[in-house]
Amino acid sequence: MTDYLINERGLSSNSVQSYRDAMVLFLEYMLKKYGIRADRLDYTDITCERVEGWLEWLENARGCCASTRNQRLALLRSFFKYLMYKHPDRISEWQCMMSISRKKSTKKNMKYLTADGIKLFLEQPDQTTEKGYRDIVMLTLAIDIGARVQELLDLTPSCFNSGKISTLRIYGKGKKVRTVPLSSKCTNMLKQYMKRLHLDSPEANMYPLFGNGHHSKLTRTTVTAIVKKYALKARFINSQLIPDHLSPHSLRHTKGMLLQEADVSIFCIRDFLGHSSVKTTEIYARASIRQKKEAMEKTSITPYNDVKTSWQKDKKLLEWLKELGK
């Protein structure tokens, strides 16, 4: 199955890990519900009814939201596709499982930082410490290039090109590579950072750009904890500027919104962020329109229907006008 996902589907190790986690949950359900251990599970034990029961279990017992449920289902569907080739004699059963519908979920508001929020957020790391210095560079770069957290962690000094226009080579989803330009401020910060940590030497070319003291990559969990730590400190200073539950992906959304508000073409934003479809990029246009609408409502005067003219306030005049129509 792993060979199928990597070699035939071309998925990354992170995607394979997500598939693994979904399968672990399914095996856990089969053990708890039907007493079937993983080493005893046969493909004939997997039925449409049991998959639907698993989805209900995810929601009720595990407390998963509808979007998480849908994500787990999507992952399991790939397993069913795999089984179609391995056991075509039960293709009707696999097709039944493939037809299980997604559950409608409410879309959450996108979390991102405004210009003032970015300033406050980036003021929190203590740059006099080694970790604080690393964090301020990492978070500034994350916003400047709008990288996914794994893209950020996969960066090495060799990805940096300090030419006339400084760029970073980013390895994105589906092994796609894109090159993004850096601002002059971010370029200078990155040069100083690499010099200070001796990452500009040839032997450090393939070290993680942001790692620990042993030149090992930070984990996604660590980066999430770093973002939440500084977000909490910033919210303590001004809760209006820092949204609740700020995550590393919120920093990516921040860049998308900055580009949208600067009237950058939606197709350029798509290419800059490495979206596979412009439909994904449209969330920034919708968020921008909603933001402008809310601003207009906050700054608008009393709605027209609530404003009464002098003749509307004159009851005698209104009664006289009504009589004219009789």
Image (tube, rainbow, N blue to C red):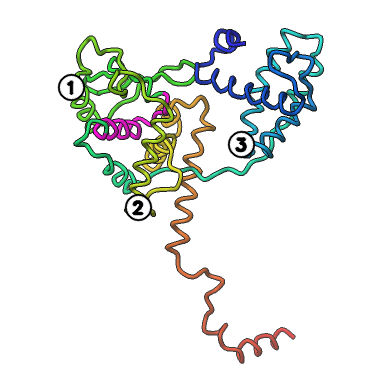
Task: Specify the principal SS of the magenta part.
Answer: helix
Residue 202 is a magenta residue:
no
Label 3 – label 2 distance at C-alpha: 30 Å
Q: Position of residue 253 (x, y in %)?
A: 43, 37
Residue 64 lies in what quarter of the image? top right
Magenta highlight range: 132-150
Tell me the residue that label 2 is attached to: 236
Residue 141 is a magenta residue:
yes
| 1 or 2: tag closer to the N-terminus | 1
Tell me the residue that label 3 is attached to: 67
Q: Residue at x 61, y 30 (%)?
A: 71
In what element is the residue under mark 2? helix
Q: Is residue 264 left or right of residue 107?
A: left
* Circle on res. 195: 1
| 3 or 2: tag closer to the N-terminus | 3
Q: Residue at x 58, y 11 (%)?
A: 2
